[in-house]
Amino acid sequence: MDFLNLTRRRSQLELLQTVADGRQQARVVRPQAGGGTPIHTRFVALANGGVVLAWPSDGSADRVVEDEPVEMLFEHAGETFSARARSIGRVLWDAVRSAQREAWQLTLPLNVQREQQRAHYRVSLDGSHTLPVRFTSTVDRAGSCEARMTNISAGGLGAVVAPRDAAKVRRGELYWIDLTLPGDGGRIDFVLRVVHDHQIDESHSKIVGCQFCPGEDADRHAACLIRVEQFVARREQAQLSHAIAIATGGA
């Protein structure tokens, strides 16, 4: 390892040590599970050759399996950082001022990087809360399929396409989509472009990221965007309240 890389690595480890010493809050997402709602936790220590996090009491980490890749997101000095690691599992942690307690052991991340600020706030949906969305090709109307939406913002959405339909949704192509958002009370439709995709090895499903595009009816496009923004704002407030409750020991 050359001097610059060694210096960068030392700075990353010092950053992790700082947030661990400060018991900073963290969010953990599971890329292989399609992202979904982040698991809210906090740093406990940098120990045992890796990162130790508090074990979530709400059961949100119970489905994480040994050696599963995860991504940690945390704030420091007004910036957001991300770090990829692997889950080792639930362990007993010897706290300095209290008895043993359950903790979450992760491997030491190989890299810590600043997150690019998103243009739009994105809300995630996971498990039974994912929403159905229908993709219809703008070229071939017969090439339609159902997917499960995993996140949405005023800029676009993410979805998981089942293996049988994975070939029907291709990067760079345009689709009509229609969906119904909880609390909205009506159908929403957009033209969108698939901007990135990748296969989930275990299930052969495809995760796609899509960007909303203005269609022929500019007024309808604008009206649908307003409804999406209202939905995002409601979910953002609910997720913030939930995170505050967990951080303060509430229900």
Image: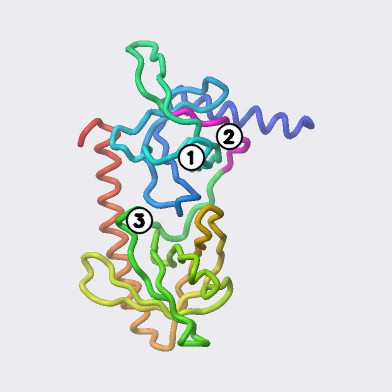
Callout 1: SS: strand
User: Pointer 3: what residue?
Assistant: 125
Indicate which label's residue lies in the foreground, 1 or 3: 3
User: Pointer 2: what residue?
Assistant: 109
Which region of the structure is painted magenta?
Answer: 104-113
Bin the neighbour count of mark 2 within 10 Å (Cα to Cα): few under 14, some 14-19, many 20 and up. Answer: some
Kindly identify the amino acid type of the residue bearing the numbered disc 1.
Met
Image quadrant occupied by the N terminus: top right
Please say if 28 is above or below 234: above
Q: What's the residue at 58%, 42% (across, down)?
A: 113
Bin the neighbour count of mark 3 within 10 Å (Cα to Cα): few under 14, some 14-19, many 20 and up. Answer: many
Query: What is the number of the mark on residue 72?
Result: 1
Q: Earlier in the sequence, mark 2 or mark 3?
A: 2
Give the image quarter of residue 95.
Answer: top left
Mark 2–mark 3 Cα distance, whole angstroms, equals 26 Å
Q: What's the residue at 50%, 50% (across, down)?
A: 32
Q: Position of residue 11 (x, y in %)?
A: 62, 30
Q: Position of residue 187 (x, y in %)?
A: 28, 77
Q: Position of residue 133 (x, y in %)?
A: 37, 71
Given residues 74 and 136, the one toward you in this image is 136
Q: Main secondary structure of the magenta part?
A: strand
Kindly identify the amino acid type of the residue bearing the numbered disc 2.
Pro
Image position of 103 (left or right of 139): left
Callout 2: SS: loop
Assess whether mark 3 and mark 2 are in contact (beta carbons under 8 angstroms).
no
Given residues 179 and 229, the one toward you in this image is 179
Assess whether mark 1 and mark 2 are in contact (beta carbons under 8 angstroms).
yes
Callout 3: SS: loop
Mark 2–mark 1 Cα distance, whole angstroms, equals 9 Å
